[in-house]
Image (spheres, rainbow, N blue to C red):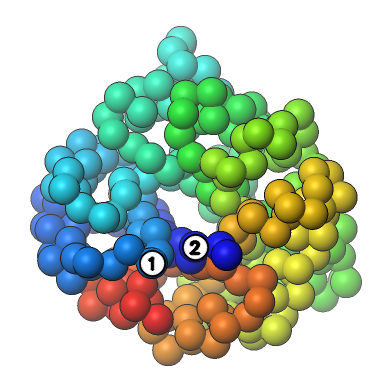
Amino acid sequence: MRKPIIAGNWKMYKTVKESADFVKQLHEKMKGISDREIVVCPTFLSVPAVVEALRFSNIQPGCQDAHWENEGAYTGNVSPAMLKEAGVKYVILGHSEKRQYDGETDPRINLKLKNVLKNGLKAIVCVGETLAERELGKTEKVIETQIQGCFEGIGLGDMADIVIAYEPVWAIGTGKNATPEQANEVHAFIRKLMEKKYNAETAQQLRIQYGGSVKPENVKQLMGQPDIDGALVGGASLKVDSFAAIVGF
Ligand code: 13P
C-alpha cells in the first residue's frame, strides 16, 4: 500500500515572514493527519524559519533544488549537506521551470540526485512533456529519456527515498490539467519503466505524484486513479485553505 504524498512547491513566492506564518496556520489544520505525507517546499531563504515553525509538526520541510557537490566555488548554489543540517527532508529536482529557465539537464539532475541521496535526503524527481511533444505523440519517448538520464546508476536500495512527479509542462500554471485518465496512463508507463529497470516490487512501492493545476476541485478524481499516489501542487499550495483541502482530498 503506497502512502499518499502531497507536496506544495511554493516556487519563488512568499517572504520569510509569510512562509513562517503560513506553516503555523497549516500546522493547526493538519494536526492528527497520519495517513498521508505532507511536504512544503519554500525558497532556500525561508527554509530555517519553516523548519523552526514545523519542529513538532507532521508537515515535512522540503526545498526546490540542491547542488551536486557539498561545497565549492559554485556561486548562487546551496548544497544537500547544508540543507540536511538546516533540517530539510525532501528536495525537488528537475522541475520543468529549472529545465526551462536555468538550463537544467538530465545528467545534472542525475548528479544532484546522487548527492541528495548520499546526504540522507529524499528526492522528488520531476519529469514531463511539453505541449508540442504531446501533440507529436512523443510523450512516452520524452518521459523514458528523462527517466533513463535522471536514474542512471541509481541503485535499487535508493528507490525507497525517491518520489517521481509527473508534471506535464502544458498543465503547469495554466489551469489546464491533464484528465485523471491521461495522467494515470503516463504514471502507469513510468511504473512499467521502473519495473523493467529495477523489479516489480520496487515499481509497486514507488510513489508517483501528479503535478499541474491540481486544485481542491480535481484532486479527488486524480487520487482515485490506481497509479496516482500524490500531488505536487504549485498555485493552490500558496493558500492555507486550498492546500489543506487538497491534503484532505
Ligand atoms: P501549478 O499547480 O501552479 O500548476 O504548478 C504545478 C507545479 O509546477 C508544481 O511543481
Name the residue beneath numbered marker 2: 3
Q: Is residue 98 visible?
A: no
The single residue placed furthest to the top in the displayed view is 72
Up the image or down, 169 lies above or below 108; here it is below
Residue 122 position within the rendered picture, expressed as x and y whole percent measured from the top left: 49, 40
The residue located at (76%, 29%) in the rendering is 153
Q: Marks 2 and 1: in contact by CB < 8 Å?
A: yes
Task: Please tell me how crowded label 2 is: few (under 14), some (14-19), or many (20+) other residues with Cα within 10 Å.
Answer: some
Q: Label 1: state its secondary structure.
A: loop
Of label 1 and label 2, which has the lower sequence position? 2
Q: Label 2: state its secondary structure.
A: loop
- Cα separation, mark 1 vs mark 2, equals 7 Å
Q: Amino acid under label 1?
A: Asp
Q: Judge: label 2 CB < 8 Å from ligand 1.
A: no
Q: Picture quarter containing residue 169?
A: bottom right
Residue 191 position within the rendered picture, expressed as x and y whole percent measured from the top left: 75, 60
- Tag count in the figure? 2
Residue 99 position within the rendered picture, expressed as x and y whole percent measured from the top left: 61, 46
Q: Which mark is residue 183?
A: none
Q: Quadrant of the C terminus?
A: bottom left
Residue 202 position within the rendered picture, expressed as x and y whole percent measured from the top left: 71, 49
The residue located at (48%, 85%) in the rendering is 220
Q: Amino acid under label 2?
A: Lys
